[in-house]
Amino acid sequence: MRSLPFAAPFQSGHPLPRDANALAGEGDSPFGELPEWDLTDLYPAPDAAELKRDLDWLEEACARFATDFEGKLAELDAEGFLDCVLRNEKIQAISGRIMSYAGLRYYQLTTAGERVKFMSDMQDKLTNFTTPLVFFTLEINRLPEDHLDGLFAENAELARYKPVFDRIRAMKDYQLSDELEKFLHDLGVVGDAWEKLFDETIAGLTFDIDGEELGIEGTLTLLTDHDRAKREAAARELARVLNANIRTFARVHNTTAKEKEVIDRWRGMPTAQTGRHLSNHVEPEVVEALRDAVVAAYPRLSHRYYELKRKWLGLDRMQVWDRNAPLPTEEPKLVNWDEAEATVMEAYEGFSPKMAEIAKPFFTDGWIDAGVKPGKAPGAFAHPTVTEVHPYVMLNYLGKPRDVMTLAHELGHGVHQVLAAGQGEMLSSTPLTLAETASVFGEMLTFRAMLAKAETKEQKKTLLAGKVEDMINTVVRQIAFYDFECKLHEARRGGELTPEDINALWMSVQAESLGPAFDFMEGYETYWAYVPHFVHSPFYVYAYAFGDGLVNALYAVYEESPEGFQDKYFDMLKAGGSKHHKELLAPFGLDASDPAFWDKGLSMIEGFIDELEAMED
């Protein structure tokens, strides 16, 4: 999701006792002083005069924009069209600032009625204010193809916005009448309500593990505990609570999938995935090449790795609660916040002092909210807010080594968003396929730095195994998620889906992706219910696999030819959404449209598994 935070793959950490869970993020956690957001860079308070000023300005600016330009775009010369674009960009900046503030406050405490109401009220106001602007993209798509090209040729500053218009015009064939487009715009807040129902339901769930009440973060975290009995207890309790709420989750998925099907049908989109591919500015055949390459590699990647892990754990069969278990040789370790910060910052500094300099304010200026707190949204994300402010990173930090990698991941997003901000509001937003590049690259830098410090064979094995598991979670698991979504949306087109129907679709992809080493406990079929991407951003998940494969190929280029790589890398991030993936990757000699490209990325994962197998000799 882009208007509100876009998430990272779930990374779990160490469970907190109930009282520490409440204290995390308030300077008294088991991990040292955890930072909290300072949202005053957006607005001082919900009732601030600055917010009222911006709301008043936005209402008037939207009305004036419609008065000045509706029905007149075809008559504008290049200078007039540039003025129109700049005014639209300013409207986007102010509305983005307001919704960023409302959304971030909400994600800090999704169960607080005042925050829920504030965000809903802001969404309602902005929807009403911006409905008159719907004409803008509709009229652009009615202009002759050569008309805009002529305007671009006359004015270089206007021509800079060509990628924005290319993306708008990609929707030309799927555009509805002006009246229907305005209706759908107004109706959007109703669809958002289902997303909020999902968020509030997830955040409000409680799980009883051996008499201790945990939220979903702490419960999922126990799936990585050294104690197998605790892992099993968490897995079974997760299944029990999800099953108790499964009708709510099924209703949310049925409704959001049906809403999408209706809109896609009216627009004439050939598949449920088409809209995501268009917004990602990526060709369907590129995504299918990625998907097919990953599925073909399941036996060489996840199947092979989990068979290795089964032997390490001394098990006849793997259970689902063993998937993310630590290795028997791995020492239980809690990483305090200062150590996590130092680890990531040293890795970033090692790549480039410039990267560390960009990352530093996240830690010093209240740009990170790290602690686990009751009612806080689960997971992690980096939200770019607007280009004239700065990004904010949300974590649920629980002190596990994997939480350090989550920090590296989200900080990579943050660095990317800072660098892309120079493009301005309309060009800074990066398609999801490329938005994961800097985050996964940040993880890779941190992993390589930690691997270089490994002093023993067991330490190296632990780090390599952790990285392989993260890659499998990012590539194999996300492509399995993508296949599940494809099946879900296709099945929903045939009618209402019962919870049992959705459960069956989920299980149809699990055995294939995880492999023959696993048994699946009763109740695992409900685990689809807690994945937020399925509700917030249908088909988002393939972007993670795209990003991982891309970064693996990029890192290979870096290792082969490090000289000058940093400058090319920063130029790629600075481009934001101003260039197609072909243009961005050309300086590195890479091409994602080449089917062989994905095999290069997957071969890095395979190489790590080869190393792990060699350690067995």
Image: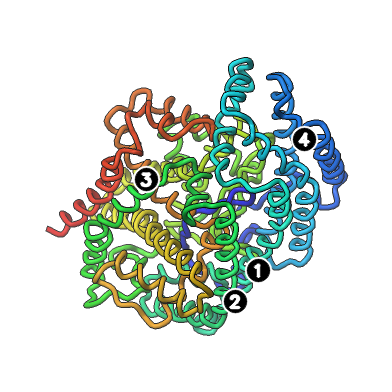
Amino acid at pointer 1: Leu
Report, in whole angstroms, how far the alpha carbon at label 4 lies from the one at label 1: 36 Å
The residue drawn where x is 50% and y is 65% is 531
Q: Quadrant of residue 75?
A: top right
Q: Which residue is mark 4?
A: 70
Task: Estimate the spatial distance between the alpha carbons at disc 1 and disc 3, rounded to whole Å.
Answer: 35 Å
Q: Which class describes the residues within 10 Å of circle 1: few (<14), some (14-19), or many (20+)?
A: some
Q: Position of residue 26 (x, y in %)?
A: 66, 59
Real-space CA distance between mark 2 and mark 3, rounded to the nearest whole angstrom: 35 Å
Kindly tell me whether residue 376 is visible in this rendering.
yes
Residue at 50% x, 44% y is 280
Q: Which residue is drawn at the image coordinates 72% and 43% (left, top)?
A: 134
Residue kind at label 4, given as amino acid type: Glu
Q: Is residue 357 above or below residue 494?
A: above
Q: Which residue is mark 2?
A: 248
Q: Position of residue 242 (x, y in %)?
A: 52, 77
403 or 121, which is in the foreground? 121
The reply to whether dot 4 and dot 1 touch (C-beta < 8 Å) is no
**Closer to us: mark 2 or mark 4?**
4
Q: Which residue is mark 3?
A: 285
Which of pointers 4 and 1 lies earlier in the amino acid sequence?
A: 4
Front position among marks 1 and 3: 3
Instruction: Look at the numbered disc 1 and give the secondary structure of its residue.
Output: helix
Rate crowding at label 2 as few (under 14), some (14 to 19) or many (20 or more) other CA atoms within 10 Å. some
Residue at numbered disc 1: 197
Q: Could you tell me residue 598's position as x and y percent? A: 30, 44
Mark 3 residue element: helix
- Name the kind of residue labelled 3 in the image: Glu
Residue 23 in view (yes/no): no
How far apart are the two marked residues, 1 and 2, measured between alpha carbons? 9 Å
